[in-house]
Amino acid sequence: MAQFGAALNFMSEIAQHSYRDLVYETPGFNDYFFSSTPILEIAGLNIGSRPASRKANLKIEDLRAIPWGFSWAQCRLMLTGWYGMGSALHRYVEQGCEGAPPTRAKRLAQLRTMNEVWPFFRTLMSNMEQVLAKTDLGIAKRYASLVPDRKLRNSVFNRIQAEFELTLDLFRQVCQHDLLANDQQLRAALGERFAYIDPLNHLQVELLRRHRLNQEKPGNNDEEESRSQRAIHMTINGVAAGLRNSG
């Protein structure tokens, strides 16, 4: 499928730039991440062979890949599976690149052909479809409420929301169906699992809020602290079990 290589290379560069711009170039994003996800609590689970971070500090650059992705799954954003793809598809459809078809309609038709005849691209879109289907912006917004700085909270979350909506729109244009419309079995299974996962997410947010407030109090009770951590860890395990591909 060499004829599609230029299009894919172009979109890959756009997606990478969009993703890195959010994570590394957005002022305050580091604080947003550590406040809005349970990354610090995940680090205490001891579920891996290595610590969550390479260094004992709060920097995204030092996190290992699995806890990074796992954290975004917990707050139902699944960011690592789709962020930047909407911008990439949109830029290609609207502007194209060298050697691309000359009109918007023809570029969109090319992407549809790629999805139909190229297994690699079809698998890429299918994997993205799964994580988009597991993303819940309503729940993610509750996690964002854990960020103390309202201005930071709103600016970052609104940016993530805009990219999600763009990605979903371009997915529908390219694949010509809604999320999981061609996989009713998985759609039904997720619907059943969400009935259990969603309450765990809401419970986790409240537990995180109380836990962090309690940590700020002088002379906090060690036994209460231990119970709080166990409860948070139980919700983390429950959400991960329900989502399955969570990092």
Image (tube, rainbow, N blue to C red):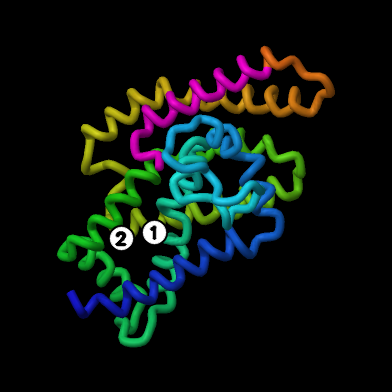
Q: Amino acid at mark 2?
A: Val
* Secondary structure of the residue carrying numbered label 2: helix
Tell me the residue that label 1 is attached to.
Answer: 170
Q: Position of residue 238 (x, y in %)?
A: 43, 24
- Tell me which amino acid carries mark 1: Leu
Region of the chain picked out in magenta, as a range? 225-247
Q: Is residue 45 above or below residue 53?
A: above
List the single residue furthest toward the left: 117
Say which of 230 and 10 sits in front: 230
Q: Which residue is mark 2?
A: 174
Q: Is residue 227 magenta?
A: yes
Main SS of residues in magenta: helix
Of residues 161 and 107, the one drawn nearer to the viewer in this rendering: 161
Residue at 41% of width from left, 20% of height from top? 196
When asked about the image quadrant of residue 113, the answer is: bottom left
Quarter assignment of residue 103: bottom left
> What is the spatial separation of the Cα atoms under label 1 and label 2, in whole angstroms?
6 Å
Q: Is 57 left, or right, of 121 in this rendering?
A: right
Instruction: Let me know if residue 138 appears in the view.
Output: no
- Secondary structure beneath dot 1 equals helix
